[in-house]
Amino acid sequence: MKLDKSFYLRDDVVLIANDLLGKYLFTNIGGVITGGIITETEAYAGITDKASHAYNNKKTQRTEIMFHEGGIAYVYLCYGMYSLFNVVTNVDGIPHAVLIRGIKPVEGLEEIKNRVKQNDFDKYRLNGPGKLTKALGIHYSYTGTDLNGATIWLEDRNYYVDKNNIIITKRVGVAYAKEDALLPYRFILDIK
DNA sequence: CGGCCGATCCACT
DNA sequence: GTGGATCGGCCGA
């Protein structure tokens, strides 16, 4: 079943990032459904988090989406060529988000393989936030999409997550955030 | 308006 | 381990 709105409205974005491991992310782009089990996430804790685009209450046309009520997508272009997909959380006015960094593909494998166009395609692993959006067809123009809709959605299919398989570490690529770059906000589900 | 820079990825050493 | 690709967003003038 799809994740309930209340899942996204909770105020602990770090807890939500952990809870998202083992949940399923799906897209329906042009009638083709692709998706997988979420295996890697990072929490971005809003206005006090130096790594967040919303740090210091920065509200621009791009980051404004994060200030909305949880349960929608925040997708933006990074390094001029990669769309990065985030789940917006918390209530209206608090710009929390969770970056989805990796999945284990389970649905639409052929389509995913065609989209990523890499020879060493690993059907057990699709790690990297830029790669997974390409695989699932999520373009940055999808920012603001309701995650309870028919285009992008998340489901709980009772996948059992063994806490012993969760690795918690610091976030990647945010050295500019200084001491906040060391926060244990990255969650990895270590499955085959 | 111009210039700088990035929540990345891949090829190459 | 390192450097280049590549372009929208952001900020300062």
Image: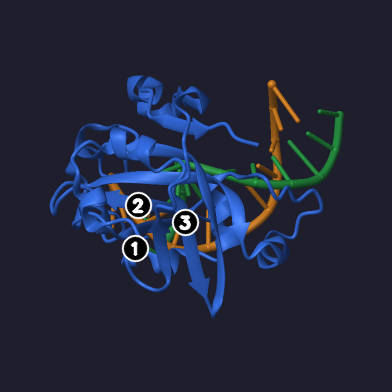
Chain colours: A blue, B green, C orange
Q: Name the residue under label 2.
A: A87
Q: In this view, does C13 lie above or below A42?
A: below
Could you tell me which secondary element the residue under label 1 belongs to? loop
Circle 2 sits in a helix, a strand or a loop, which is it? strand
Q: In this view, does A14 lie above or below A103?
A: above
Subunit under mark 2: A
Q: In the rendered structure, which disc, 2 or 3, sits on the residue that comes first in sequence?
A: 3
Q: Which amino acid does label 1 sit on?
A: Leu
- Look at the image and tell me in which quarter the C terminus of chain A lies: top right
Q: Which residue is drawn at 31% across and 46% down?
A: A97
Both marks 2 and 3 on one chain: yes
Q: Nearer the viewer, residue A72 or A38?
A: A38
- The residue that disc 1 covers is A147
Q: Choose top left, top right, bottom left or bottom right for residue A56.
A: top left
The image shows residue A114, relative to residue A119, as above or below, that is below
- The CA span between labels 2 and 1 is 8 Å
Category of crowding for the residue at label 1, using alpha-carbon neighbours closer than 10 angstroms: few (below 14), some (14–19), many (at least 20): many
Q: Which residue lies under the disc numbered 3?
A: A25
Specify the subunit that label 3 lies on.
A
**Is A182 situated left or right of A12 in this image?**
right
Specify which label sits upstream in the sequence, 2 or 1.
2
* Residue occupying image coordinates x 31% and y 66%: A146
| Kind of residue at disc 2 | Val
Q: Give the foreground label among 2 and 3.
A: 3
Across and down, in percent, residue A159 comes to 47, 45
